[in-house]
Image: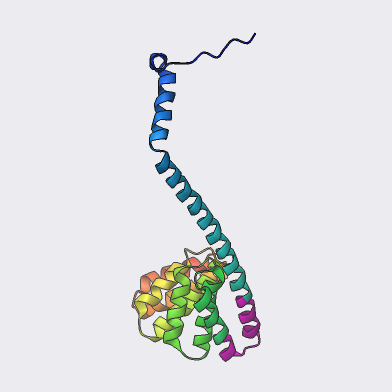
């Protein structure tokens, strides 16, 4: 014959610290059951929203990649007006994606090709401010330096050329930036610094 289950009284629970804690937890949960249910529902909704957002981000990136592909095809054909339209469409609709940010670089080059230096300045500055393409960033900063130089803004031109040395780009790009920098330093009558830069370039093995 099975021995009947022994009931644990509230008094006995209070004697055992572990059982007392379990009892308190159970009582607390029963008291705040509605609050926990509400918070739990809110957490589930938040998780669903995050999953939806990530999926939407993935979809946006795929669409942006497709738009970039179309723009690059036109770019290769040197149809600058159509290329400008395609890249502007890309940056307007997908400006926060990697492809959208890259679109600013090509827009800057197109604007320079068409002689719109101020618009090129804005697009290239937008590109270098947030991008994942160090090789292109170095070229963009050299282009920016040329625009600033043409505007007699040597301070900003020098700033962008100095930045190239901090970027993970090719040695030829770094050398090009340094030579440009030495030239601007001479224009700014900073002869000693310009000479120091040239001397460092000449002793490098991969010039």
**Is residue 128 shown to the viewer in this render?**
yes
Residue at the top extreme, as displayed: 1
- Which quadrant would the C terminus be assigned to in this image? bottom right
Q: Is residue 185 visible?
A: no
Relative placement, left or right, of 51 versus 19 is right
Q: Position of residue 165 (x, y in %)?
A: 47, 66
Q: Nearer the viewer, residue 190 or 40?
A: 40
Which region shows up in magenta? 67-84
Q: Nearer the viewer, residue 103 or 50?
A: 50
Residue at 37% across, 70% down:
192
Residue 80 highlighted magenta (yes or no): yes
Q: Residue at x 44, y 69 (%)?
A: 129
Residue 131 on the magenta segment: no
Between 105 and 2, the one lying in front of the other is 2
Q: Is residue 159 left or right of residue 65?
A: left
Magenta stretch, main secondary structure, is helix
Residue at 47% from the left image edge and 48% from the top image edge: 41
Q: Quadrant of residue 21?
A: top left
Where's residue 80, x and y in %?
58, 89
Q: Is residue 150 left or right of residue 98?
A: left
Residue 35 placement (x, y as % from top left): 40, 43
**Viewer-side residue, 18 vs 5:** 5
Q: Position of residue 118 (x, y in %)?
A: 41, 86
Against 112, residue 188 (above or below) is above
Q: Which quadrant of the figure has residue 206?
A: bottom right
Tell me the quarter of the picture where residue 162 sits: bottom left
| Quadrant of the image containing the N terminus | top right
């Amino acid at each position: 014959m099975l021995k009947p289950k022994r009931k644990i009284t509230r008094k006995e629970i209070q004697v055992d610290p572990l059982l007392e804690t379990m009892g308190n937890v159970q009582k607390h949960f029963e008291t705040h059951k509605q609050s926990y249910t509400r918070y739990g529902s809110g957490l589930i909704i938040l998780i669903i929203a995050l999953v939806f957002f990530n999926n939407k981000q993935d979809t946006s990136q795929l669409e942006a990649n497709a738009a970039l592909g179309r723009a690059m095809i036109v770019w290769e054909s040197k149809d600058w007006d159509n290329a400008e339209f395609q890249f502007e469409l890309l940056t307007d609709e997908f400006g926060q994606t990697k492809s959208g940010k890259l679109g600013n670089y090509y827009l800057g080059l197109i604007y320079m090709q068409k002689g719109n230096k101020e618009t090129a300045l804005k697009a290239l500055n937008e590109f270098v401010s947030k991008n994942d393409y160090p090789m292109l960033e170095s070229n963009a900063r050299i282009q920016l330096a040329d625009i600033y130089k043409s505007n007699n803004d040597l301070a900003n031109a020098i700033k962008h050329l100095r930045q190239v040395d901090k970027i993970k780009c090719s040695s030829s790009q770094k050398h090009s930036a340094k030579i440009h920098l030495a030239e601007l330093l001479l224009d700014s009558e900073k002869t000693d610094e310009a000479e120091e830069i040239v001397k460092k370039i000449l002793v490098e093995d991969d010039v």
